[in-house]
Image (cartoon, coloured by chain):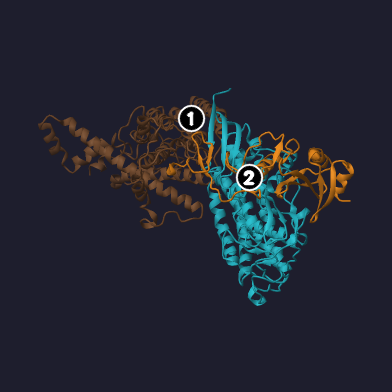
Chain colours: A orange, B cyan, C brown
Amino acid sequence: MNSAEELKNLLPGSVISTGLQLNKPMAVVKKEDLVKAAGKAKEIGFDHLSVITGIDYRDHFEVIYNFFSYSKKQNLAIKVNLDHDKPEVDSLTSLWKGADWLERETFDLVGIKFIGHPNLIRILLPDGWNGHPLRKDYDMNTEQFVTIGDNGDDVVSPDGTNLLRRK
Amino acid sequence: MESDELFINMGPVHPSTHGVARFKLRMDGESIKECTPVIGYLHRGTEKIGEMKTYLQFIPYTDRLDYIAAFPNNYAYVKAVEELAGIEVPLRAEYIRVLTMELNRIVNHIVSIGSLLMDLGAATMIMWGFRERENALQLFEMLCGARMTFNYIKPGGVREDIPDGFIPKLNEFIKDMEKRIVDYEQLINGNEIFHMRMKNIGVISGKDAVNYGWTGPTLRGSGVDYDLRKYEPYSIYPDLDFKVCVRKEGDSYARFIVRMDEMKESLHILRQVVDNMPATKLISMAEYGISPMTGTPTAVSTYFPRIFTPPAGEVYSRIEAPKGELGFYVVSDGTTKPYRVKIRSPSFCNLTAIPSLVKGLKIGDLIAAFGTIDVVLGDVDR
Amino acid sequence: MLFLAMWTGDIMFENTYELIVFILNFIGIYDPIYNVFEMFGLEYLLRIIIVLAEIAALFVFILLTVMFLTWMERKVVAMVQARYGPMVTGPRGLLQPVMDGVKLIGKEDIIPAKADRWVFTLAPFLIFIPALLVFIPLPFGESLIISDLNVGLLYIIAISAISPIAILMAGWASNNKYSLMGAIRAVAQDISYTIPLALAAISVVLLTGSLSTVDIVTAQSGTWFGFIPKWFIFLQPLGFILFLIASIAEMGRIPFDFQESESELVAGFFTEYSGMKFAMFFLAEYAHLFSVSAIVVTLFLGGWSVPFLSSIPATFAVLIPIISLAAFVIKTYVIIFFAMWLRDTVPRMRIDQLLNIGWKIMIPLALLNLLATAILLTAGVF
């Protein structure tokens, strides 16, 4: 029995299906029960949150959490499916402090909202950036101009009026 | 005693932020009350580029992530693609890959320790280190023509077999490096001031380190015996004899010592790799005689078609890069380009802990702690 | 021939002025010149001219030394770090300081918009003044002293205390947080290290019973048992170590270079300076290095005295100022080399550690040293 099936046995109501992410066990979890499932995973030894990946599948979003257990040396991936119109899922920051930046990054680049995150602001791109680049409908041809404002914050404008030279 | 709060904007251009990191510091005199890292100044949208390039075209971009140690980046991505497409790699190619990666680990740790010492005010170490690093870079140059951005490891093997005269030079380097590491230890390890600056500074327990998602030497400095090379072995690591360097203290000094020890282990691995490398040379592209544009991947050559389509699927593949766990999440939709490339960079995840690590410490400690976490901003910002 | 008659092993002339008058007399041109000045009733003018010429010569000597020191520092650092250092300008890069000067003069002299212009401009000049004035009561050799003040040592310590004011001015006027922090650090450091410095010096004063630097040096001439030179380093080993550490702290060099600590505070108090003003700080730093080393030599290493100088054949007595000058310079360079060597090998401390050591270790030890000296002196051991 792999770790995903183990999780399904523990939380039969929350885990929709189990399978393999190529060679690693993966459990698809109801998005409402994500924190519960992740907490359970942490309880059974999956203490390392390796990565959070958000994927835009045009009709829906997927967020994949890759866990690892240092004690059991086992992998586990948990996947949630989100609506394309309302990409929201509960934050795991209460369980893993390391989830903080990973979720911020996913929010920044993919535009998935993590409910309950203490500081959900952009991390790699400047504040005020329009759009989330890793979405498939992101407009690559629109330029955005970034400068540093008077108080040190980033200022973004689509037409470059914030750049001194272009004034 | 409380005094007025002082706000300091450390970076993005600052001598010891190793690139363009910025820390917003709220200070009480010399003590840090709150540290907020601001990153993203080097963001190049590598993941987006990954979606727009073919599988092979993306490899050079991985070089630019952690430019201090680029071979593991190449390898991590290529490993993900190979797992996705089910490509087998000839044993000799795996040996060459491990050789480059371990050599690169030494280079990375030299730079890491050197720049840490330079931030502490002792500039000698980085100069000594760069002397040896230069030798290693010349080896890389011999191997693939590039010194830092290699684009050498390809799906199905490596770009070219190792050139003649490489192994003797490598042996020379290993011999030299053994003596040099002793030199480094004599220069640094016994220094009282260095101990004052490093011991009990930036302490993090193993449990917290795991919670923060720390990996690599930083995690092993906190007493967690974990190394992907050992416990989730890939490539030829199961056949190699090496030990995982762990320290219990969890302070800056422990992280430093772990890196020192890992250099020695890497040398040990290199020696085994040189001894056990299969003698059959890899077949080069010209010898194979197939158009580079089409054809099927093969397991015995350095040759790989420029365009190929792995079956649809997704994979999360990770390796033990010098800085920690480097993972690539690659999703294929059955076309020539990946549907999604997600990079789990060790620098990014290790940097998460810095606000709690330096709270209440002095500016000098922030620099020491930042130095021991060993980040490369190209890897953080991607 | 006159030298022959005069040399008894004691001081020949009180100061350089008298030496010059004597030499002018000896070659027979002093009287004619004096007569000319006397004709107009301007004898004092002659005196002033001679003293000014002395001071000019001293300043030229100091500036040349400082330029040489910048070159020497680079060379010593390069030697330690397995590099060449400057090699291109002049033989073995000897003209590098000149090129540096040319470069710095050619740079734009920037005054930040929100800086306090007057204070900002004044600070680099003010910091140079103590660095030069300190040399007035320092004996460079037998008879080679501008003025033998009877409070020479007090004068030196008092004049040295001006430099924190200049640093504070520079840091404050720059209107930059890094500069201000550097300045505050420098002041805190100078205050806490001037105390052990002065206390260690007082132990020497107890031994000689005089604040005059010439008296201190003469008290150190001769030998014990015919082979140990009577230097105070042997009577005051603890005092010497304390004084040396405090001096290096006063100089603001690694491991105590908190006023600039470039990896933490960018460049400390002179972050905002450029061009010639920056050069002034740079030169003052080396003038300070030279002066402080000279003071260490004067107090603890016998100044210009050479153990067996008094047994020199009287025929060569004319050489005594030259020999003593050479002895003084060599000893000073030994201390300077030590400071440079230290800079290359140890990291920087942390500001709180520095202050802790200053107040909790150095000052009690210096007091203890003073007490022990006084007791031994009263008991008649010394």
Picture quadrant where residue C331 is located: top left
Tag 2 and tag 1, C-beta contact below 8 Å: no
Is residue B254 visible to us here?
yes
Residue B382 in the image: state x and y as whole percent.
61, 50
Count of number-bearing discs: 2
Residue sitting at x 40%, y 46%: C69
Which image quarter is the N terminus of chain B in? top right
What's the CA distance linking mark 2 and mark 1? Answer: 46 Å
Identify the residue under disc 1. C184
A126 on left or right of A164: right
Given the image, on which type of amino acid does mark 1 rest?
Ile
Which chain contains the residue that carries disc 2?
A: A
User: Label 1's element?
Assistant: helix
Residue sitting at x 49%, y 24%: C378
Residue B118 in the image: state x and y as whole percent.
54, 46
* Residue A132, numbered label: 2
A99 on left or right of C54: right
Vertical relation: B1 (above or below) C148: above
User: Label 2's element?
Assistant: loop
Residue B241 in the image: state x and y as whole percent.
76, 59
Front residue of B265/C63: it is B265
